[in-house]
Amino acid sequence: MYDLIISDIDGCLSPEDSSPLSIEKLNLVAEHNRLAFSQHDRPKLTLCTGRPIPFAEGLCRLLQNPSVPCVAENGVWLYDPSCNGYLMDPSITEKQLEMVHEAELFSLKTYRKDGVTLQPGKSASVTLYHPDPKVLQRLAPELQQQFDQHGFEFRVSLTLFYINCDLPQITKASGIDRLLEVTGIDPSRTAGIGDTSSDLAIAERVKTFGCPANAIESVKQAAHFISEHEQIDGVLDFMQFLMDQ
Ligand SMILES: [Mg+2]
């Protein structure tokens, strides 16, 4: 019934904090993929993440996906494992790339004193990190205001430990559109899973959307399937649900 499962990483396949990944449980996903790619009898699983492309590449390869592109950096990149392809969304202009660098410097100068750091490895977005979610919740509206005042055109959104600042036309949905276009996969044969606001864009594009128990309320409201289990246990639960359909 499904050809593809599009999964968020943080809060789904791995904890959003820096604690160790579950090798045993990731191996269950990898084994599922190994069979999906060799037997074509179950949906393949690929990634759709706000993380920088190297993290997506690493996890894609670990999860035994040899050929379906992953969406990284909230839609900026497709990583194509079949040819080691790094494909930036062609709608991103040189002017926007310059603005990203300016906004990066501006964010650092303004919020370094609050203990904020920038997530390394971003190419066409800016991501601020702080270990205390309360600090980020306080800073996010202020940052959006500052960007608007300085003419930096970004959409500012929160995950647990990060503030993501993305270009207006770039979302997980624009990334999924490119993914479906290059693979020719029928959107009505896709499923997706996510846990925070940027994943609402996954829900918009896939036929069936699920979330783990740790998802935020608005994501739960958009979901056809809400697992009782958290994070990767929730993903495995959703995969089982899809297989039983
Ligand atoms: Mg997440």
Image (cartoon, rainbow, N blue to C red):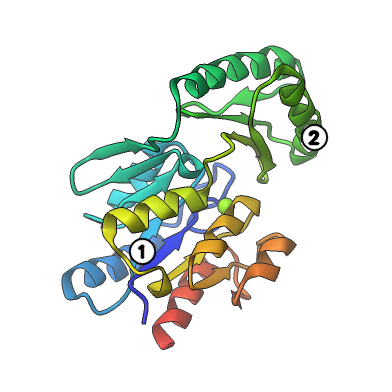
Image-based side of 154 in relation to 111, left or right: left
Image-based side of 108 in relation to 189, left or right: right
Where residue 5 sits, quadrant-wise, is bottom left
Report crowding for label 2: few under 14, some 14 to 19, many 20 or more residues within 10 A (C-alpha): few
Q: Is mark 2 within 8 Å of ligand 1?
A: no
Q: Position of residue 23 (x, y in %)?
A: 39, 57
Quadrant the C terminus occupies: bottom left
Residue at 69%, 35% (x, y): give it: 131
Residue at 28%, 53% (x, y): give it: 182
Q: Position of residue 95 (x, y in %)?
A: 49, 19
The residue pinned by badge 2 equals 141
> Which one is in front, 18 or 148?
148
Q: Position of residue 90 (x, y in %)?
A: 38, 35
Q: Position of residue 115 (x, y in %)?
A: 71, 22
Quadrant the N terminus occupies: bottom left
In the rendered structure, which amino acid carries the disc numbered 2?
Answer: Pro
Disc 1 secondary structure class = strand
> Which one is in front, 78 or 56?
78
The residue pinned by badge 1 equals 45
158 w.r.t. 244: above or below: above
244 w.r.t. 217: above or below: below
Disc 2 secondary structure class = helix
In the rendered structure, which amino acid carries the disc numbered 1?
Answer: Leu
Give me the disc on residue 14: none
> Which one is in front, 135 or 223?
223
**Residue 139 appears in view:** yes
Report crowding for label 1: few under 14, some 14 to 19, many 20 or more residues within 10 A (C-alpha): many
How far apart in space, not on screen, are marks 1 and 2 (Cα)?
35 Å
Observer-side mark, 1 or 2, equals 2
